[in-house]
Amino acid sequence: MKKIMILLLTLLMVFSFTGCNRNGDKPGEDEPIKIGLTDAFTGDRAGNGQYTKEGVDMFLEYINGKGGVLGREVVVVYEDDQGNETAAVNAYQKLILENEDLTAVVLNKYSSVVLAMEPYVADSKIPAICSGSNVKIEQSTNPYLYSTRRSDYGSGATMAAFIKQEGAKRVAILYSPDALGKGMSEIVIAKLQEAGIEVVSSQQFSEGEKQFANYVAKIKESNPDFIVCIGQTSETGLIVKAIYDAGLNHIKCIGNSAFAQATTIEQAGLEASEGWYSITAFAAGTEEEPTASWIRSYTEKYGHAPEMTSVTTYDALSMICYAIEKANSTDPEAVNAELKKILNFEGIAAVYSYNGNPMLANSEFVIQIQNGKAIVLTKVIG
């Protein structure tokens, strides 16, 4: 009798431990669908992470409010990549190691950070949607990497065409030292030279730069009739203010998408920002639907307008959940296969299609800052 009791207790313990150990188990049908996300939640770029999180919260409220996906709640698991390459690789690896049941991942907008994570995305075989725009992302053959943006090649060409249209003859360029700045500036310079427009000054500022007066002084010396600036939102407001403080606000200025964002306008000031142009994937001043209605809902919820990353994150999550529904599965390979079938998917920032490379969007806006708002001048498609 004693031997039988010992055997029963032993079996009970084995079954108990087996039931508690979920490593390697497939998530049950009643368990949440997990989507990972990395962005900067600390450091100089933490503001970007806050706007990203607001976009996530908007989406989760919407999707879970209508019953989730496949009858399951959708949750987002966050990791802080601090907006730099080393921390991003660590954040991505931690996200994957600690969450074996991830269906997909959303990455941030910093191209250099995305490119640092790209090999790990390939190794993990989990689909990842970023909002980086560097040409190297467009050229990536990683079958699991996607972007909600048009590439910098297209944006750079649009910028150069607009500068030519405005009749510029002498252009000064100031750009960041990361993948965005180096990549986009090369494209803009090449396109300007093709158009016979002289680049009278080209400067790369230092990483983490906060003082732009000396760079702007050199721009002033070159006597340009148009100024091009390329940088991240942690820098753009300071650049706009430095140009204004140097008395160069009478010269036409254009920047990448970061110069169209509310944080840039707030940091630089309304007067300094007035009249700036930008090539951007998202404009909070658009009147197009359904974007305009979404912007109003966002503004009512948070008390301020969304940034680009709020919207592109929302769209990334929308496409992931659409792919899950189409696949009728949370298996990453099945979801990845459905992402490659995306065609004319109507998001908030753009209409998305997969065309054989990671860049899912084919449109952007030329905007001008007027009275503190990004007003759409034209929409560029192709």
Image: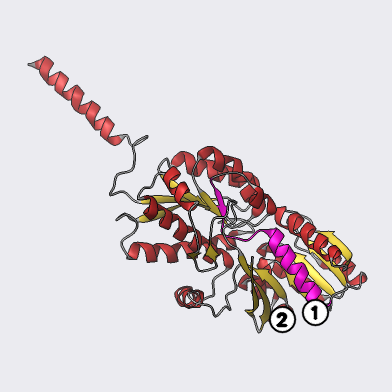
Residue 365 lies, in percent from the top left, at 64, 72
Q: Residues within 10 Å of mark 1 (few under 14, many from 20)?
A: many
**Is 220 covered by the magenta stretch?**
no
Q: Is residue 34 left or right of residue 361?
A: left
Q: Nearer the viewer, residue 246 or 52?
A: 52
Look at the numbered disc 1 and give the secondary structure of its residue: loop
| Pointer 2 residue | 274
Q: Residue at x 48, y 53 (%)?
A: 341
Q: In the picture, residue 367 is in which quadrant?
A: bottom right
For badge 1, the amino acid type reads Asn
User: Residue 268 appears at what percent x and percent y?
Assistant: 70, 74
Q: Residue sitting at 78 percent across and 76 percent down?
A: 165
Question: Are the two marked residues, 1 and 2, in contact with CB atoms closer than 8 angstroms?
Answer: yes
The quarter of the picture where the N terminus appears is top left
Q: Residue at x 73, y 63 (%)?
A: 156
**Residue 277 versus residue 50: which sits nearer the camera?**
277
Q: In 3D space, how far apart are the residues under numbered discs 1 and 2 (Cα atoms)?
A: 9 Å
- Disc 2 element: loop
Q: Position of residue 138 (x, y in %)?
A: 64, 52
Magenta run includes residue 165 = yes
Highlighted range, magenta: 144-167
Residue 270: horizontal and vertical position, in percent? Answer: 68, 81
Q: Which is nearer the eye, 160 or 224?
A: 160
Q: Is residue 270 left or right of residue 4?
A: right
State the colouring used for the structure image.
secondary structure
Residue 249 is labelled as: 1
**Residue 39 appears in the picture as rendered:** no
Amino acid identity at mark 2: Glu
